[in-house]
Amino acid sequence: SGPATVSPTGRETGADQAAVAQGGAYLTTAQGARLPDTDHSLKAGERGPVLLQDHHLREKITHFDHERIPERVVHARGAAAHGVFQGYGTAAEITKAAFLAKGVETPVFVRFSTVLGSRGSADTVRDTRGFATKFYTSEGTFDLVGNNIPVFFIQDAIKFPDIIHAGKPHPDREIPQAQSAHDTFWDFVTLHTEATHHTLWNMSDRGIPRSFRMMEGFGVHTFRLVNAAGATTLVKFHWKPKLGVHSMVWEEAQITGGMDPDFHRRDLADAIEAGAHPQWELGVQTFPDNPEQTFEGIDLLDPTNIVPEELAPVQPVGLLTLNANPSNFFAETEQVAFHPGHLVPGIDITDDPLLSGRLFSYLDTQISRLGGPNFAQIPVNRTHAPVNDMLRDGMHQTAVHRGVAPYRPNTLDGGCPFQAGADMGAYVEVPREVPAAKKVREAPDSFADHFSQPRRFWLSMSPVERQHIIAAYSFELGKCYERAVKERGLRVLANIDPELCAGVATALGLPAPEPSQPLATVEPSPALSQIGRTWPLD
Ligand code: HEM
């Protein structure tokens, strides 16, 4: 026995409940008593004091007083849509996940977001964008909680509070809302040089997308897929937009942000309403599951690394179509709760230390954001698979559980049949050797190269993209008050490329430093440039 009422989709339930709550010919209290008037308080005389006994007044104001819930600690600003995912069947050899099988259609809910601004901030800022997808599969919910940038700032989740504290507005003045133009952000990313690659993507045109419909998405971490025979393959997930990848130029973003700070959420909702349903192909890069978990010398557990598509092409495995706008922003876009640990049979995690920390963080934050442990019962968060979870009671419990014995097996609830075992479609973690254990608080040596991949990105850019990157660093670093932070920023750039460093140094009126280490010898990856980028969809 799971929640007492389980609806096929959160969206329908949200709409149904809204209809029930707002239906009928009479205005009522929350208890259903009809109201004669909702505009005047009960008073002792026309000009006398308001009476405490006015239940309608107190109920109306009390409820209003508690309408807000905490915004997400990151990714607070978002817009979402419903859709459908159709598997191509092309992943059948590498995963048993049912929703990827040929022709299977799975309802999805996708939320796009900025990372650092508050709920009311502008869409058009320079920032990373979240791209989180909830697949309501027949085997349970699978969440792919990704970004529009394929790498992350840090390699270990223990630094997440630090990078976010550095990136959020200064604690004294609560400015700026935009991601990067301030001292603490640049202080952090120049002291923790593993952030160089992600920062470079932010300073490129990818930091100011034209539209959510024109962004790539990335699962970032390496995942482990398992097929029906138990064989494993390491993969990175990619979303490829049918409309291509497009950005604004900086000046466009400034004007658009001033004229319409809701530009991206309006663009998404208008397009869907007009029937221009945005589409993405889901693809995977595949790598042999070798004991080192490396590919062509690239550490696959380091989330600051990509694997160039020239070395491992992205292979399409299914099609996502967004076809319906939420009917209630709060019920759906605000209350949706994604979690990288929501996995289905055929998809497992790897030991990427950033992913491990995420597995703890999302559930933890949602218990406080959504008011207790029962948010899986909120319509948009309900799985479409049957639930029999033995979880009971707690804040905001809405299910009426039956029976007396919420444990299995038991002999009291009608002899409750209980089956266990790996062979009944259960989610079973892939058995893996754990390396000889020595407790350490260290990063592996393979996490130490912070500049080769940024250099590859820079070398892959077209001349106009390079100009934009130089202009972005010049503007953002130029906003810092501390000269030492600007100078350290230039020292980081010197380790990426002399042209980049010199361009920014000239704009800042500071000398261009020499690199502190030999520049890496890397091949460009033309797939990284947005110019002339095509995708097999069209
Ligand atoms: C929220 C992506 C790293 C903690 C989100 C969201 C996305 C995302 C897309 C918004 C979900 C939504 O729309 O509701 C990523 C990616 C990461 C990453 C791609 C790295 C590869 C981390 C780390 C932590 C973290 C390392 C903490 C250790 C959170 C929290 C939220 C969040 C607390 C708010 C969740 C909520 O309130 O529902 N992240 N994130 N993230 N992320 Fe991450």
Image: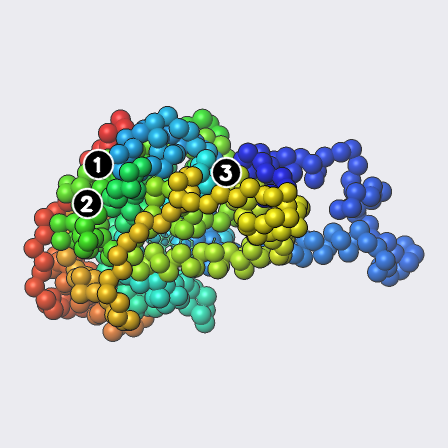
Q: The C terminus is located in which quarter?
A: top left
* Front position in the image: 431 or 81: 431
Q: Is mark 1 on a helix, strand or loop?
A: loop
Circle 3/circle 2 CB separation < 8 Å: no
Identify the mark at residue 288; answer none if there is no mark.
2
Residue pointed to by mark 3? 385
| Labels 1, 3: front one | 3
Q: What element carries label 2?
A: strand
Q: Could you tell which of marks 2 and 1 lies nearer the N-terminus? A: 2
* Whether the residue under disc 3 has CB within 8 Å of ligand 1: no
Q: Where is residue 417 in the image (x, y as percent from the top left)?
A: 55, 41
Any part of residue 526 in sight: no
Neighbour tally class for label 3: few under 14, some 14-19, many 20 plus, Cα within 10 Å? some
Q: Which residue is drawn at 29% across and 33% down?
A: 92
Q: Residue at x 65, y 56 (%)?
A: 66
Q: Give the vertical position of 102 relative to 207 (above or below).
A: above
Q: Residue at x 43, y 53 (%)?
A: 75
Label 2 vs label 1: CA separation? 27 Å
Q: What residue type is labelled 1?
A: Arg
* Whether the residue under disc 2 has CB within 8 Å of ligand 1: no
Q: Position of residue 394 (x, y in %)?
A: 62, 57
Q: In this view, does 35 lie to the left or right of 82?
A: right
Q: Could you tell which of marks 1 and 3 lies nearer the N-terminus? A: 3
Neighbour tally class for label 2: few under 14, some 14-19, many 20 plus, Cα within 10 Å? few
Q: Could you tell which of marks 3 and 2 lies nearer the N-terminus? A: 2
Q: The N terminus is located in which quarter?
A: top right
Residue pointed to by mark 1? 533
Q: Which amino acid does label 2 sit on?
A: Pro
